[in-house]
Amino acid sequence: HRDLAARNCLVDEHNVVKVSDFGMTRYVLDNQYTSSNGAKFPVKWSPPEVLHYSKYSSKSDVWSFGVLMWEIHSEGQTPFENRSNLEVVNDITKGVRLYRPHRASPQLHSIMYRCWHEKPQGRPTFSELLEEIRKL
């Protein structure tokens, strides 16, 4: 998807969430997309490999899903709200991650935090996330 964020989620009358705005989506055979230089992307929802190398994969969407969970449990706050994009890039590079929102249990924040692993291979898959969230 490459732009998974609360602003792109719709909730219907049955509380079913539907993801919208597939404008940044790309079909890729190897499950990874490398954008050309100068491509715009949502910095505050992006993992290190996107920030530094413009490399997208399902694991970069997992990172964004962690930020989406943070948005929901912070009641719609903007991640890194008082930080510039450059400051966020520097913070993420140094290992800084979003704090636990007061509405998120420590267990849920642990799941979020796993989504923000520095290396893509260290992040859970969406299937693993589904299993973990169902157990909460």
Image (spheres, grey):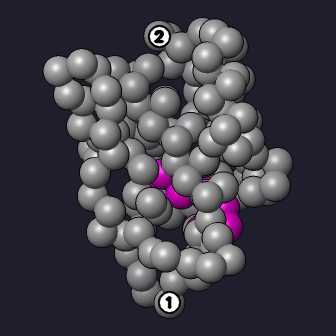
**Of callouts 1 and 2, the N-terminal one:** 1
Crowding at mark 2 (Cα within 10 Å: few <14, some 14-19, many 20+)? few
Quadrant position of the C terminus in the picture: top right
Residue at 62% from the left image edge and 79% from the top image edge: 29
**SS for tag 1?**
loop
Residue 35 point in image, percent of width and height:
52, 83
Q: Quadrant of residue 130?
A: top right
Q: Which mark is residue 37?
A: 1
Q: Is residue 82 above or below residue 112?
A: below
Q: Name the residue at 33% across, 32% down.
A: 17
Identify the amino acid type marked 2.
Arg
Dot 1: few (<14), some (14–19), or many (≥20) neighbours within 10 Å?
A: few
Question: Residue 105: x and y, percent?
Answer: 60, 9
Q: What distance separates the C-alpha of mark 1 from that of mark 2?
A: 38 Å
Residue 12 drawn above or below residue 51 = above
Q: Nearer the viewer, residue 33 or 29?
A: 29
Residue 41 part of the magenta segment: no
What is the quadrant of residue 58 in the picture? bottom right
The picture places residue 102, in percent across and down from the top left corner, at 49, 11
In the image, residue 32 sits, relative to residue 42, either above or below, namely below
* Disc marking residue 15: none
Work out whether residue 82 can be spotted. Answer: no
Label tally: 2
- Closer to the camera in the image, 90 or 26: 26
Q: Nearer the viewer, residue 109 or 88?
A: 109
Q: Which residues are magenta?
A: 44-50
